[in-house]
Amino acid sequence: MARKPKLAVWKFASCDGCQLSLLDCEDELLAVAGAVDIANFAEASSAITKGPYDLSLVEGSITTPHDAERIHGIRRSSKVLISIGACATAGGIQALRNFKNVKEFTSIVYTSPGYIDTLAKSTAISDHVKVDFELRGCPISKLQLLEVLGAFLQGKKPNIPSYSVCVECKRRGVVCGLVAFGPPCLGPVTQAGCNALCPSYHRGCFGCYGPKETPNTSSLSPSWLRNGMTPEELVRLFRSFNADADAFRKESESHEK
Amino acid sequence: MKSRTVKVDYMARVEGEGAFAVKIAKGKVVDAKLKIFEPPRFFEALLRGRLYAEAPDITARICGICPVAYQMSSVQAMESAFGVKIDPQVRALRRLLYCGEWIESHALHIYLLHAPDFLGYDDAIRMAKDHPETVTRALQLKKIGNDVMILVGGREIHPINVKVGGFYKIPTKQELFGLVDRLKWARDASLETIRFTASLPLPEFEQDYEFVSLRHPEEYPILDGRLVSNKGLDIPVADYEHHFAEEHVAHSNALHSTIKGRGMYFVGPIARYNLNFARLPATIQAEARSAGLSKECRNPFKGIVVRAVETLYACEEALRLISAYEPPGQAAAAVEPRASIGSGCSEAPRGILYHRYKLDAKGIILDAKIVPPTSQNLKTIESDLRRFVEQDTSLPDDKIRSGCETIIRNYDPCISCATHFLKMDIRRE
C-alpha cells in the first residue's frame, strides 16, 4: 500500500478557529485521519513526527521576528503549503495595527511594554514565503477545507470560486439587502464561501472572505457616500478582518483624510 | 543530585501555544513558570475608535473556541452602558446559544484534549482505534453543540447573528424543536460522559483555593449574576476592577490577574460548580454524587468530571429553554448610544470573562478592557505545578513532564485568549 501523505497544521498569530474547523468536521474527522498521516497538529495530538511533510496547513499571521524566521523552516519542510483563514491570507484583524503606531498599541495593553517583542505590521504568510493555495475566510468554511484536502489527495486544483457573495444570494433566492434595506452590505465586493450567510440572517455582509477577484470597490463607495454614509463609516467597513487585503486597504485609505 | 535539563518544544492539546519551566534544586522546586509567548494581538488597542456595534464581531476573533462568550460579555457591557432592556425571550435565546458553546467546548476538551492523558494516548484519533464508541460519541456530542450555535448564531465559529440589543434574526419555534431529539440523545451521551470521566484514574490532589464565579439568584450561572467567591467576595460586575488587578510579568505575553489583597484565584467549571451547586437540578446533583463528587470539589484533576456534569446541565437547560420558547416580538431592542461606561461578565466555558468599555456620545469606543478566564487562572496553574512537583521531586523527568502537562490541561487553558506558546523545560540543579 502506498504511504499515506503526511499532514502538518501550524499556528501563527490567530484565534485558533481555522484549525478548529478541522476538528469541527465531526462526521469526516476519522475518515480524514484514515486518508492522511496527521504528523504534526499540536492542538489535537502530542505525537509529533518530523518533516518533510506532504501538506502543511498554516493558520495565523506573521507578527514577531521569531515567527518571520519560523515560517521559512516550515516552507522548507513542506511539499505543498496552504494558508488558511483571514489572518494567514491577509494579516487578520490584528493587521489593524498596520494603520497605526504599534508602540502606542503596546503601551495601551501592557503595563511593561519592554517585555513585548513584536513587529510593526501583521502580514500574510504569502508576504514571507511561496504559498501554493490561499483558503480565505474568517473563519474558513469547513466544506471548503474538505474540498481543499480532497483536491490535494487527488492531485487536482481545489474548486473554490472567486466570485462574489451576490452570486450566492441569487442562487439561494435571498432577498437583496442592498435593495430592500439599503447599505451597508459588502456582498458585491466580497468573495463567496459563506453561502450568503449574513444576508440570509437579515444582515449586510461584512467581508469575512475578503475581496473577490477584481472587486469594483471604487464604484460601490461613492454611491453609498451619496446616500448618506460617512467616510468614517466606510473606513471602518473596509477595515476589519481583511483590512490589509489589497483592494480593501486601498479603498479604506482613499476615504481617510 | 546531578544537574539535568529536560525539554519539550511544544505543549500539545491546548488551545494555543506555550511552554512551562520547572526548576528543581536539592529536592525543592525553586521556580515554576508557565510561559506564554503567543504573539500579542492588541485587541484592547484596536477597539479604540470602533463603533460599539462592532465589538461583538471584533472581540469574537480573540478566540475561535469560545467566540460566544466574547459576544455575550461585549453586548451585555454595551447594553449596561446604554441602559438597554432585553426581552426575556431574547435572553433565553442567548442562554441557548451559550449552552451550545458549553457543549461543544466541553466535549472537545473532555474527549479530544484531556482524556488521552489519563488513558495513555497521544490523541483522540489514536484513542479511537481502541475505543471507537467513545470517540464517536464525543464527536457527535460536540457536533450537537455546534448545531445549536449554527441555528441560533448562524455558524459555530464566530457566529454572525448576535448584536447589541438582541439578534439580527430570531429562530422560529419549529426550527428550535428540530434540535430536540438530538439534544435528548446528547443528554444521554452526557450521562455516559459522566460515567466515563468518573472511571478515569484521576490523581488525588486536594488544595485550598479561592474559587470565583458568577452567581445568579435562580439559575446556574451562564450569562450574568454577581461575582462571588468562597472567601467572602460578593460584588456586582461593575465593581470588578476595584477588587481585581492585572500584572505584567516578563515570562508571559498574557497578563496575570490577582484578587487585591489576597492574590491568586481559580475560575472555571469547578469554581462555578462549587459556588452554585444548589442551583443545579436535583437530578443532576444526584448524577454528580454518583460520579464521586461531593458538593465541593478541591481537586483540579476532577475538573474533567465537573465538565461532564456541566455538559449534562447544558443539554437539559437547552431542552428546557426550547420547550419554554415563545419568539420575542422584536429581534432586537432599540439602542441609543450615549457617553458612558459599561461592563459585562459572562461564564465562558473556561470561567468568567470580563469586558468594560468607555464610549462617547456617538457610541465610539474610547477605551476597552478585556480579562479572559485563562489569564485569571495563570497564577493558580503555576502554584499547582509547584505543589505537584514538590510532592515527589525524585520522580523521573518523563513522569514529571506528563504530570505537569496534565495539570495545565486541568484548566483547559485557552492560550489564544490569554495570548500564547507553550514550550517545556525542566531544570535540575
Image (cartoon, helix red, strand yellow):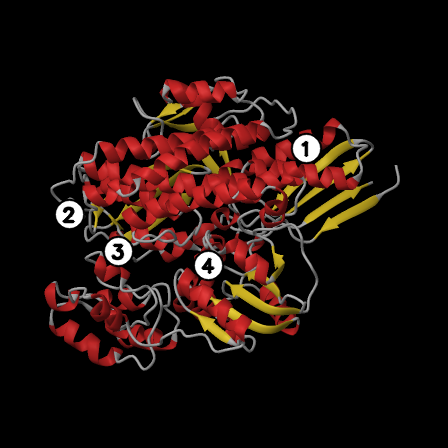
Give me the disc on residue B386: 1
Q: Are marks 2 and 4 on the same chain?
A: no
Q: Are marks 1 and 2 on the same chain?
A: yes
Hey, which quadrant is residue B208 in on the image?
top right
Please provide percent x and percent y for residue B260.
48, 29
Report how far apart the C-alphas of labels 1 and 2 lie in the structure: 51 Å
Name the mark nearer the viewer: 3 or 4: 4
Name the mark nearer the viewer: 2 or 4: 4
Q: Which residue is mark 2?
A: B336
Give me the disc on residue A18: 4
Residue flagged by tag 1: what amino acid is it? Arg
Label 4, residues with CA under 10 Å away: few <14, some 14-19, many ≥20: many
The residue that appears at 63% across and 32% down in the rendered structure is: B384
Q: Which residue occupies the extreme right position in the image?
A: B2
**Residue B265 showing in the rendered view:** no
Circle 3 sits in a helix, a strand or a loop, which is it? loop
The residue that appears at 25% across and 69% down in the rendered structure is: A187
Residue flagged by tag 3: what amino acid is it? Leu
Q: Are marks 4 and 1 in contact (CB under 8 Å)?
A: no
Describe residue B156's horizontal placement relative to residue A255 as left or right.
right
Residue flagged by tag 4: what amino acid is it? Cys
Q: Which residue is mark 3?
A: B51
> Which residue is at the front of the view, A256 or B179?
B179
Q: Which residue occupies the extreme front position in the image?
A: A1
